[in-house]
Image: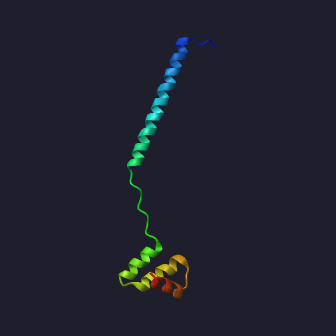
């Protein structure tokens, strides 16, 4: 293997610098694109959904919702909905 002279070493360093600059540029673009996205809205928690059903006159449906998502008995879920 031949020895590398100063010119060859400079060329290799320039190639590595260009590759590093491209990678940094792609990372900057990716971060800017990701920052522009809006986060997904979080689904309302159980109490908020049950409260909305109760306010809409659907207390029994709110009770069934609490039962299905928590495993509470119907009586316990009804007490929970009444306290909302």
Tell which residue pokes out farthest to the front in this image: 83
- Closer-to-camera residue (45/8): 45
Number of marks in the rendered image = 0
| Residue drawn 51% across the image and 76% down it | 69
Q: Which residue is at a point 49% across and 21% down the rendered structure image?
A: 14
- Which of the 4 image quadrants contains residue 60? bottom left
Quadrant that contains the C terminus: bottom left
Q: Residue furthest left?
A: 56
Left or right of residue 52, residue 19 in this image? right
Q: Locate the N terminus and report the quarter of the image it occupies.
A: top right
Of 34 and 15, nearer the camera is: 34
At 41% from the left and 78% from the top, the residue drawn is: 51
Position of residue 6 measured from the top left corner of the image (x, y, whole percent)? 55, 12
Asked if residue 60 is positioned above or below residue 20 in the image, the reply reads below
Q: Position of residue 7 (x, y in %)?
A: 52, 12
- Coloured how? rainbow
The residue drawn where x is 44% and y is 37% is 26
Q: Position of residue 39 (x, y in %)?
A: 41, 56
Above-or-below relation of 76 to 7: below
Q: Residue furthest bottom?
A: 75
Residue 24: percent from left, percent from top: 47, 34
Of residues 51 and 72, which is closer to you in this image?
Answer: 51
């Amino acid at each position: 293997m031949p020895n590398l002279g100063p010119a060859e070493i400079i060329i290799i360093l320039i190639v590595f610098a260009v590759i590093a600059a491209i990678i940094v540029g792609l990372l900057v673009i990716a971060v800017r694109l990701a920052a522009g996205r809006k986060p997904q809205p979080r689904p309302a928690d159980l109490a908020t959904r049950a409260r909305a059903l109760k306010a809409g006159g659907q207390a029994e449906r709110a009770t069934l919702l609490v039962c299905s998502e928590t495993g509470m008995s119907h009586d316990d879920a009804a007490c929970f909905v009444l306290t909302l």
